[in-house]
C-alpha cells in the first residue's frame, strides 16, 4: 500500500470571516450597553453615598464644634453642586475655603417639588432646621427608582 500524503490547507472564506466579525460585534455592543448602564448606576449610588457621608460629617462637626453648619444644594445644568461651611466669623471653616463638590447627572426635589436652591442647617444639638424629604433623581432617566432621604 502506498500512502498518499495530502497537504491540503483549508482557509476561512470571506463569508465566514464576515459572519464571525458580525457576531463578535453584536456581543461586544451588548456587553458595552450593559456595562454603561452598570457604570451609570454605580456613579449615581456613589453620589448618594457621598451625600449621606456629607450629612453625617455636618452633624458630627456641628455637635463637636458647637456651631451651626450650613449645607447649600444648587441645581446645575448637569448635576447638583454642594457647598458646606459655617458663618464667616466662626467655626472650623474660618481659615479655609468651604467644602465644595458636584454630583453629576442627578437633580433633586424637596418635599415633592423641584427647587433651584436648598439650605440645610445642622445645629449643635444634633437637629436640622430644614426638615422634609429630599428626593434625588437621575437626569438621564436610566435609573427609574428615585432615592429619598429624610432631612
Image: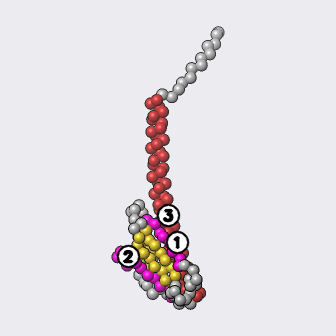
Residue 113 vertical placement versus 35 (above, below): below
Structural distance between the alpha carbons of marks 2 and 3? 22 Å
Q: Quadrant of residue 63?
A: bottom right
Give the label on residue 63, or none: none
Residue 51 vertical placement versus 143 (above, below): below
**Which residue carries the number 1 mark?**
50
* Quarter of the rendering occupied by the C terminus: bottom left
Nearest to N terminus: mark 2 or mark 3: 3
Residue 138 spot, x, y in % from top left: 41, 66
Tag in front: 2 or 3: 2
Which residues are drawn in magenta?
Answer: 98-123
Q: Quadrant of residue 3?
A: top right
Circle count: 3
Circle 1 packing at 10 Å, graded few (<14), some (14-19), many (20+), is some
Structural distance between the alpha carbons of marks 2 and 1? 20 Å
Circle 3 packing at 10 Å, graded few (<14), some (14-19), many (20+), is some
**Which residue carries the number 2 mark?**
116
Helix, strand or loop status at disc 1? helix
Q: Is residue 122 magenta?
A: yes
Helix, strand or loop status at disc 2? loop
**Which residue carries the number 3 mark?**
43
Query: Is residue 60 at all visible to an observer of this figure?
Result: no
Nearest to N terminus: mark 2 or mark 1: 1
Nearest to N terminus: mark 1 or mark 3: 3
Residue 106 spot, x, y in % from top left: 43, 68
> In the image, what residue occupies the spot 48% across and 58% down?
38
Q: Are marks 1 and 3 in contact (CB under 8 Å)?
A: no
> In the image, what residue occupies the spot 52% across and 86% down?
88
Residue 134 vertical placement versus 9 (above, below): below
Which of 132 and 81 lies nearest the eye of the viewer?
Answer: 81
Amino acid at each position: 500500500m502506498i500512502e498518499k500524503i495530502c497537504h491540503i490547507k483549508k482557509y476561512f472564506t470571506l463569508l465566514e470571516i464576515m459572519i464571525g466579525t458580525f457576531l463578535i460585534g453584536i456581543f461586544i455592543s451588548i456587553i458595552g450597553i450593559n456595562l454603561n448602564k452598570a457604570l451609570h448606576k454605580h456613579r449615581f449610588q456613589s453620589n448618594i453615598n457621598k451625600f449621606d457621608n456629607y450629612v453625617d460629617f455636618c452633624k458630627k462637626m456641628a455637635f463637636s464644634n458647637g456651631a451651626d453648619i450650613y449645607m447649600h444644594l444648587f441645581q446645575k445644568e448637569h448635576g447638583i453642586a454642594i457647598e458646606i461651611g459655617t458663618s464667616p466669623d466662626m467655626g472650623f471653616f474660618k481659615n479655609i475655603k468651604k467644602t465644595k463638590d458636584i454630583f453629576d447627572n442627578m437633580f433633586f426635589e424637596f418635599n415633592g417639588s423641584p427647587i433651584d436652591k436648598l439650605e440645610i442647617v445642622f445645629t449643635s444639638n444634633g437637629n436640622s432646621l430644614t426638615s422634609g424629604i429630599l428626593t434625588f433623581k437621575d437626569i438621564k432617566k436610566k435609573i427609574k427608582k428615585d432615592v429619598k432621604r429624610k432631612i
